[in-house]
Amino acid sequence: MRTLIKLSLVILVAVIVPSGTLRAQSILRDAETERFLYDLTNPLFEAAGIERNSVKIGLIYSKSINAFVAGGQHMFVHSGLFTAADNLGELQGVLAHETGHIAGGHYSRTKDAYESAGMISILSMVLGAAAIAAGGGDAGIGMIMAGQSVAQGNVLAYSRTQEAVTDQAGASYMEAIGVSGLGLISFFEKLRNQEILAQVRQDPYVRSHPLNRQRILALQKVVHASPYVNTPLDPRLSETFNRLKAKLRGYLDHPTVTLRNFPLSDTSISARYARVYAYHKALEWDLALLEADALIAAEPNNPYFHEIKGQILFENGRVDDSIDVFQGAVRLAPHEPLILTAFGQALVSQEDRAKMARAMPVLKQATRLDRSNTFAWFNLAKAYSWLDMQAEASLATAERYYSGGNASQALMHSQRAMANFNTGSPEWLRAQDIAILARAAVDKQKKRSSRRRVSDTPHSLNIMKIQ
Ligand SMILES: [Zn+2]
């Protein structure tokens, strides 16, 4: 399971594409990046009349530029979009545009067993498949299908009218929060140049829905009419954007490329951030630790710097040291489920009863904050098991499969939990809820699989790409 959360980023998903070949697809999970994306989108959601935090955001590892909404409640951002944005304003602009599609209800209602059962979210299916592909070998076909559709960024092109309306909506949200919309224009122009230059190498964002000149002109009109057109970008968010971009590049690029782009003479936080990952990739643990320590010295209260140091120590086999560092990170950020999960993982990995007892409340908190984290559920179940709390272990395992989309396993473990808890207790009731939903999903799957033999449709999810 060690490979599951690498340096606090990335989980691998194996995806079966229609041709039958296997292709790897990654979901990047990073507490700091996710926090930042929520910080950017929440004000936009509010401006659009969407409840804060009601849309889940996932970062997908792909060099292509893309962003799309799935089911109206999930927004996926490709790492390529992040790294292609030259400044905060460009990323913010694209997120504002996407928010416009959600607010406009621009997603189709297609049939999907899980969605109609209301059982699990697409994001958790993807993450569930990720966890399972990396460690468990118990992936259900439903998850693979979901991962596949998400990986393909299954496209339903928007109409020209929808795009025009969404451009205006996005610009109005930017104005409502006092942010200049120039970033969106410069990003669209960049994409438009790409469209003109290289038809074959176009990113999916452009390919499915060409940007026309008229559209950019209309956008320019409304952006330049805003009183905030020349308002400078928020310096704090800009700094975070630069750091996260460097972090992502350090994680994704070859170490030699990173060290060329961020030479040792550059002692900025961003450069050190990139180098931590470069050294980590190059297995230069001592150098990676030196950079992590320099980051902590610069900002002792930054939980993400402690998190990175903990991860380096953990992956280098220095688990005891990592536990102390993770504890410090959790103290600074007690509500970050991914940091809690990393701390819990380090404790559980030692297979020691006392450490299991320490891990239990940590992982309980992690799963309370992020119920779709199958990896945290897995470790929590292990801790319960060590502490001879079998009923709780069964329920945690049921939760793990439930959020991972494996209905038959969720059903089995929830029934086991029900048999071991007192009837009517809160735990028993929760197990019953899972059992009911899982059984419905199993039945639906059976019906679907018999239908599938007649006409197999790989594009079964209602995923909509945003242009
Ligand atoms: Zn669009």
Image: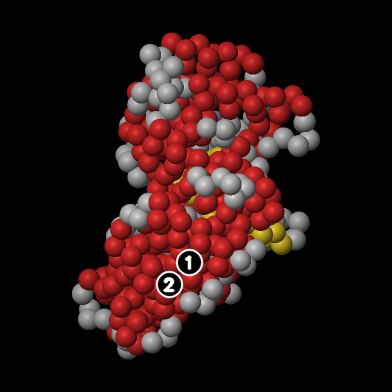
Q: Quadrant of ligand 1?
A: top right
Instruction: Identify whether 33 is placed above or below 232.
Output: below
Task: Confirm or deny contact between disc 2 and disc 1 (CB under 8 A).
Answer: yes
Locate residue 385 relative to residue 187 in the image: left or right. Answer: left
Residue in the picture at 35% in, 82% down: 355
Quadrant where the image shows the C terminus: top right
Residue 316 image-quadrant placement: bottom right
* Marker disc for residue 311: 1
Instruction: Identify whether 118 is placed above or below 268.
Output: below
Q: Secondary structure at mark 1?
A: helix
* Mark 2 lies on residue: 322
- Amino acid at dot 1: Gln
Q: Nearer the viewer, residue 152 or 379?
A: 379
Residue 156 image-quadrant placement: top right
Q: Secondary structure at mark 2?
A: helix
Q: Nearer the viewer, residue 454 or 18?
A: 18
Please state the horizontal and vertical placement of residue 442, each as a whole percent of the image.
Answer: 49, 67
Q: Can residue 142 be seen in this snapshot?
A: no
Residue in the picture at 52% in, 32% down: 87
Gap between marks 2 and 1, in whole Å? 7 Å
Please state the horizontal and vertical placement of residue 177, each as a whole percent of the image.
Answer: 35, 26
Q: Can residue 323 be seen in this snapshot?
A: yes
Locate residue 331 relative to residue 371 in the image: left or right. Answer: left
Residue in the picture at 32% in, 39% down: 51
Badge 2: residue crowd in 10 Å (few <14, some 14–19, many ≥20)? many
